[in-house]
Amino acid sequence: MLRVELNQKINDDGSPVTHALHKYHILEKDLISAKIVRRSLDARANRPTVFVWQIDLELNNEADYINKLKNRIRRVQPYVYKKPLPGSETLKARPVVIGFGPAGMAAALLLARMGYRPLVLERGPAINERKQNVEQYWKTGLLNPEANVQFGEGGAGAFSDGKLTTRIKDDRVQLILEELIKAGADPSIAWMNNPHIGTDSLIHIDENIRTAIESLGGTIRFNTKAESFGIRNGSIQFITTQEGEEIPCNAVILAIGHSARDTFVTLMDTGVPLESKLFAVGVRVEHLQSFINHRQYRNVDNDSILPPAEYHFSHTSTLGKGVYSFCMCPGGYVVAAASETDTAVTNGMSYAARDGINANSAIVVQVDQRDFGEGILAGMNYQKKLERLAYELGRGKAPAQKIQSYLNHVTDTEIGEIKPTYPLGVNLTDLHELFSDPLNQSLEEMLSHTNSIFPGFADHGSIMTGVETRTSSPIRILRNTDTMESMINGLYPAGEGAGYAGGIVSSAIDGLKCAEQIIKRFAPKH
């Protein structure tokens, strides 16, 4: 297999494979197969805007082409996932996976494929019932604490655009993308730069993954919460559900998600080693998507032929705090993401088409013990405090303020050109009341800095809505780096809730790694 690179003008709708063959003088009769590996967009100023393609070609006479093209072409090896070999220890019962978000789904699917017939316990409902609960909350404000943007089939990722970008370097990324395509995702996610699925498409994909697990002997039990953990002599022995059922087990994957606050408390009280970790808090900012397109595609006359533009900004404040944009949603919506009553929590999402009028992203500030205090649960309690305060400032809605007004310390009296998309409505107020002085200073510096390099970012009625707190878990469940196992024998913390991943793909890979360790250690139970 040989890999080539091609620049193609954005208004050229010809086949990139055909263009590649022509560019590298490859005879069509020598082409056996072609696979697009990646497409990115080069829209830098003062040069033509082009799509940059990487294409793998399977050719006859590959050695001749390598010799002729030299450093313009290179040989690559197709990725093949190596399944782990089963171990010999005895499973006292089926392996249990707690949580059916990305980490739990990936772990359960691999265990099922390898004959381990996993039992999945998910505290929330199946995706269609969950969707109804979420839509009811967004329309009426009536929250179901066990069926919301955080809990239920698909985890928090199901209602946050289905972003598949990740910074981790792991060959399993390709495996995760392939599995999503098998489950119904658009094949373009395998090669798009910053791929995404869309909240509307994720519903069917989650269902298909569940069906695959069940067809292989796995069992998924919804509305089943792990209430307590039976630990004896440093090993997991059983799990008790909220109905009082005792489930025996000696291999458990904890994929509980970053918002399972009650489960964190239970784990701490049970003696599972935890530690407080750093995270970030902030606001959701909204702009017209047309403005973002105009700024990013400055040298394109007709930006409608391009995907909705994205951005990423970061800055270090004079106080040494990192501030950055997070979870940018082109053509998206700011959503209500609370999992506890009388709180206001924001998140962002887009549908597959990304055709909303506004763009949004979180602008968040890193927080540590100086902000939330000492203690394992201090960060979690800090999140809760901010969420309750946001609800109070929003008078039951979400607090909001124009970016320019925030920078000028002026309270708004009316909404401007940008209409906030938060479904429960907003109350205009002074967002300085939400954060401490160090956070406000860092946030102001970030917004001013961004406006200087991206003119207009703080203007045109652009608005910010609070509060964004669920960027990552405030707690880490300690585990062995090599075996992925907690200090409690048989307990494998995984994904965002365990504090070792961030986002759909990295969480799924973390779940895979934990499943691999169980497979390597135990023989399947027949």
Image: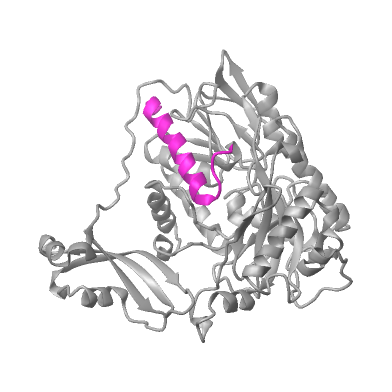
Task: State which quarter of the image contains the N terminus.
Answer: bottom left
Q: Within the magenta stretch, is there residue 224?
A: no
Q: Within the magenta stretch, is there residue 506?
A: yes
Q: Is residue 82 above or below residue 94?
A: below
Task: State which quarter of the image contains the C terminus.
Answer: top left
Q: Position of residue 457 (x, y in %)?
A: 68, 70
Count how many numbered circles sit on residues in the image. Answer: 0
Residue range corresponding to the magenta coloring: 499-526
Say which residue appears at 65% left-offset and 73% top-offset. 455
Foreground of the two, 363 or 82: 363
Q: Position of residue 504 (x, y in %)?
A: 53, 50
Which quarter of the picture shows residue 423?
Answer: bottom right
Q: Position of residue 70 (x, y in %)?
A: 17, 63
Q: Position of residue 111 (x, y in %)?
A: 42, 37
Colour mapping? one colour
Foreground of the two, 455 or 124: 455
In screen coordinates, is 314 left or right of 58?
right
Foreground of the two, 171 or 182: 171
Q: Residue furthest top?
A: 233
| Observer able to see residue 184 | yes
Q: Is residue 467 above or below residue 524?
A: below
Say which residue appears at 41% left-offset and 84% top-offset. 11
Foreground of the two, 493 or 106: 493
Say which residue appears at 27% left-offset and 77% top-offset. 19
Q: Residue furthest front?
A: 318
In screen coordinates, is 426 left or right of 479?
right
| Observer able to see residue 341 | no
